[in-house]
Amino acid sequence: MNTVVIGTQWGDEGKGKIVDLLTEGADCVVRYQGGHNAGHTVVIKGEKYVLHLIPSGIMHKGRICLIGSGAVIDPKALFNEIDMLTKRGIDLKGRIFVSDSAHVIMPYHQALDILTEKAKKGKKIGTTGLGIGPAYTDKYARTGIRIGDLFDKDGFEERLDLNLNMKNFLLRKMYLHPGFSKKKIMDEYMGYAKRMKEIACDISLLLNNFMNDGKNIIFEGAQGTMLDIDWGTYPYVTSSNSTIGGLFTGLGIDPRKIDRIMGIAKAYTTRVGEGPMLTEFPSGMQEVMRDEGKEFGATTGRPRRCGWFDAVVVRYAVRINGINEICLTKLDILDKLKKIKVCTGYRYKNKILKEFPSQMGVLLRSKPVYEEVPGWEESLVGKKFYHELPENAKKYIKKIEELVGVKVSLISVGEGREQSIDKD
Ligand code: GDP
Ligand code: IMO
Ligand code: MG
């Protein structure tokens, strides 16, 4: 069984927890896009791990974890993460491999990310500041440096020269930044080469062999549908395809071999960074729910913006990704509410839109239309079976199923692995 786990909102839906849960029945877990902008939390027996680049299946002994060509890799961040996990007693030997054609995040990428954001003043995107956008920009400009380039010193130096000529000019003239020394970067990155060589691979070949051998694979999306470069709330998005297409371009596998596409949806909505989010709570409620849901970014620690469940968004994610089932997370965070609102459409001028608008101008002029349902006002923590859920919680789940058009198969009621309810 090959399962895709994909975010249906603006990221942080709880993908990490669910990937960890599903890894029990898998042999291999694969990240296919994004970089260490992701922050995926796994909680095992009360112990919390935040993963940025390493797939969230790593806590399960013996499972192989892969990072695909569609990802961008900061070697320093990758090795720090590997070392952190090793220190915490997780044996990673022979279990982690990265694509040799993934692009490398260079020091000037991070500098440019931070400086361009600053220059945008009131128009900033609110990036994680980790160099993700500039690394993808170089990929598409065909000036990027790939993991495999680290193993050819002369070739690497040539590509670095080309880049530093342009980047240092831009940094110095436009941003009054001192620029970067070639020697320093050469020393640092050639220092990563030896360690990287041990884990670099031809990801397409490896994965296709795994699939032919009948191994069970989980594909772990990073970010979420609304942060996708093509299908998200552009320009307030990340720089990769976080929707299903990114899996295929990022891994080079047979699309017909995917069995299950699971969308992860939080029982409400959150977003970190700038950009429209129609169902955002008013202040007061905003802070209460943020505290209740511990909604602070796993990567940057920034407070997440919180709002009601937006069925227009999740229905759109179902369409864009071919999602056939939903895992509803953080349902427990709504425990105390007397009434719960669900956004069923957008009011634009005198029309009600049922589909997510493709034009930013329309989205910005739309207002959410809500339906109100009664809360359950009791704790879901400790519930193990669907039949134990209060009637109003079941009704809320049913309402979501009706609105988004696919069934909810899995319900999460706590951060721990075991706090999950298999609805089927
Ligand atoms: P990801 O980026 O999609 O993997 O999500 P994050 O890890 O960034 O954010 C989800 C947060 O919610 C993490 O702190 C998880 O431990 C936590 N979490 C996940 N599922 C649940 C749940 O059902 N209930 C509660 N209370 N917390 C959850
Ligand atoms: P996970 O995988 C939530 C957001 C940033 C910013 C925008 C662009 O944990 O769900 P970037 O640094 O990617 O150029 O920033 O995207 N963003 C995320 N928000 N969860 C994430 O990942 C995110 N990765 C990027 O906050 O708004
Ligand atoms: Mg996250």
Image (tube, rainbow, N blue to C red):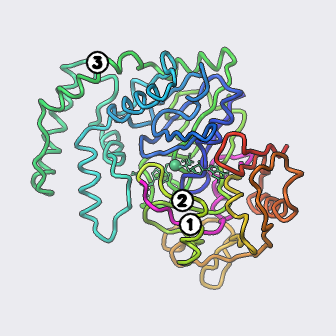
Which mark is on residue 306?
1
- The residue lying at 80 percent from left, 43 percent from top is 422
Where is residue 188 shown, x and y percent of the image?
Answer: 21, 28
Task: From the image, tell me which residue sits under label 3.
Answer: 151
The kind of residue on which mark 1 rests is: Cys
Q: Specify few, some or many for label 3: CA neighbours under 10 Å numbering under 14, 14-19, or 20 or more.
A: some
Q: Is mark 1 within 8 Å of ligand 1?
A: no
Q: Earlier in the sequence, mark 1 or mark 3?
A: 3
Q: Is mark 2 within 8 Å of ligand 1?
A: yes
Check contact, mark 2 vs mark 1: CB within 8 A: yes
Task: From the image, tell me which residue sits under label 2.
Answer: 295
In the figure, is residue 63 to the left or right of 84? right
What residue span does the magenta drawing correspond to? 301-327
The kind of residue on which mark 2 rests is: Glu
**Mark toward the viewer: 1 or 3:** 1
Depth check, front residue: 14 or 210: 14
Q: Earlier in the sequence, mark 3 or mark 2?
A: 3
- The residue lying at 76 percent from left, 46 percent from top is 410
Q: What's the CA distance linking mark 3 and mark 2? A: 41 Å
In the figure, is residue 321 to the left or right of 363? right
**Mark toward the viewer: 3 or 2:** 2
Where is residue 54 shown, x and y percent of the image?
Answer: 48, 33
Q: What's the CA distance linking mark 1 and mark 3? A: 45 Å
